Image (cartoon, rainbow, N blue to C red):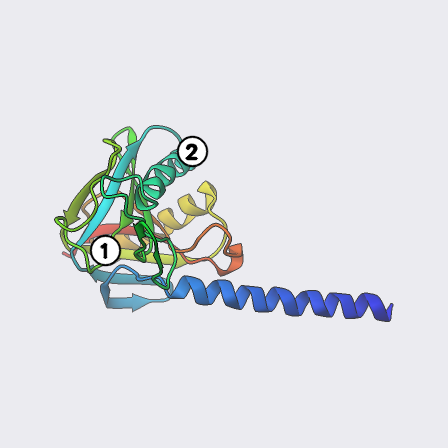
Amino acid sequence: MRTLSYGRLVGMIFFAVLSLVIVNSATTIEKAKYTVVEKEDDFELRQYESRIVAETYVEGSLKDSGKDGFRRLYDYISGDNKEKQSISMTAPVGQEAGSKKIAMTAPVNQEKKDSQWRITFIMPAEYTLETLPQPTDERVTLLEEPGRLMAAVRYSGTWSEASYQKHKSLLEEYIQKRGWTQKGAAVWARYDPPFMPWFLRRNEVLIPIKQS
């Protein structure tokens, strides 16, 4: 019994240390820049700055299109581009022979556009459209998004469609309660890598709005 208890204690300590390492790694990633205009419980009104994104459009379900779109964009930042530059998903910035590693920003965004899903990676602020490596996959495009006023709700947990739909509905109800006008499709924002424990993940639903 004593050995079992000791083993459990060691396991708990190891898991706690591993979680801290993972969280520290994730928090070093450059994130999308915004200013909080208003805050109420888990809801926020944010003014986002303009930014450059790599985007791709995918047919299919929320889950499958997210995987396919993520893979295309991950291939691009991993060196599938004309300059053969590698844009790292994690920080700190490193350097390898033959490739340039650049820390990528968070989150990864997914939103519905007609019958397709639009998946985007936000590019580091130090880059311009002229200095970013050009994709070799014609399904990947680079563009600059203008700043937007967005309503947001934040939650932790798994990347299930049920959880996304639940928080999307909560945000839509909040927008209606505040008398705001929705100006575009909901965006599903995921900040953390797949190996982040589900209970530590930062997930959000964002909706562009216009205040009355």
Looking at this view, is 168 or 66 the one in front?
A: 66
Residue count near mark 2 (Cα–Cα under 10 Å), binned few <14, some 14–19, many ≥20: few
Whole-angstrom CA distance, mark 1 to mark 2, is 26 Å
Residue at 44%, 64% in the rendered image: 25
Residue at 51%, 66% in the rendered image: 21
Q: Position of residue 54 (x, y in %)?
A: 24, 44
The amino acid pointed to by label 1 is Met
Looking at this view, is 78 or 42 the one in front?
A: 78
Badge number at residue 150: 1
Does label 1 or label 2 sit earlier along the sequence?
A: 2
Q: Position of residue 65 (x, y in %)?
A: 38, 34
Q: Are marks 1 and 2 in contact (CB under 8 Å)?
A: no
| Apparent side of residue 196 relative to residue 189 in the rendered image (left or right) | right
Q: Is residue 181 visible?
A: no
Q: Which residue is mark 2?
A: 64
Residue at 42%, 33% in the rendered image: 64
Which quadrant holds residue 165? top left
Looking at this view, is 150 or 121 the one in front?
A: 121
Discs 1/2, front: 2
Residue at 52%, 58% in the rendered image: 199
| Apparent side of residue 205 relative to residue 145 in the rendered image (left or right) | right
The amino acid pointed to by label 2 is Asp
Q: Position of residue 79 (x, y in %)?
A: 32, 43
